[in-house]
Image (cartoon, rainbow, N blue to C red):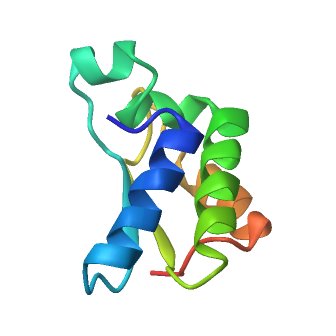
């Protein structure tokens, strides 16, 4: 599960070098307890600083060659929050728009 920027950056470098992948898609939609308890998946919906660090690490390692997408849920709880997160991520100018 992706929760560590340097590890994810190395994975992106490997994808760029060894595959014909067109983009990387970060999955913030996974609600599985095991994943969330590790601070990955849907847990990143509430960890904006960590998420930004991961996105910056990945985009820095790929030097902008590999577009980054982010899959999100409508929110962490009953209250939708994805619109807030989407605006925040767009302000970082690192992800590809959907």
- Based on the displayed image, in which of its 4 quarters is residue 91 positioned? bottom right
**59 and 61: which one is in front?**
61
- In this rendering, the answer to whether 70 lies above or below 6 is below
Residue 69 appears at what percent x and percent y? 45, 69
Q: Residue at x 26, y 87 (%)?
A: 20
Image coordinates for residue 28, horizontal then vertical, percent:
39, 45
Q: Is residue 92 above or below residue 31?
A: below
Residue 70 shows in the view:
no
Horizontal and vertical percent position of residue 88: 72, 56
Quarter location, residue 17: bottom left
Image quadrant for the N terminus?
top left
Quarter of the image with the C terminus is bottom left
Which residue shows up at 29% across the image and 81% down it? Answer: 21
**Position of residue 44 in the picture relative to residue 23 (left or right):** right
**Figure check: 7 above or below 69:** above
Observer able to see residue 1: yes
Pick the front one: 41 or 18: 18
Q: Is residue 10 above or below residue 77?
A: below
């Amino acid at each position: 599960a992706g929760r560590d920027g340097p590890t994810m950056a190395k994975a992106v470098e490997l994808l760029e070098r060894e595959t014909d992948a067109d983009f990387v898609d970060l999955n913030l939609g996974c609600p599985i307890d095991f994943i969330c308890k590790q601070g990955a998946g849907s847990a990143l919906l509430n960890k904006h600083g960590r998420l930004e660090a991961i996105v910056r690490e990945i985009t820095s390692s790929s030097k902008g060659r590999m577009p980054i997408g982010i899959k999100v849920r409508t929110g962490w709880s009953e209250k939708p929050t994805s619109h807030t997160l989407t605006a925040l991520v767009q302000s970082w100018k690192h992800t590809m728009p959907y």
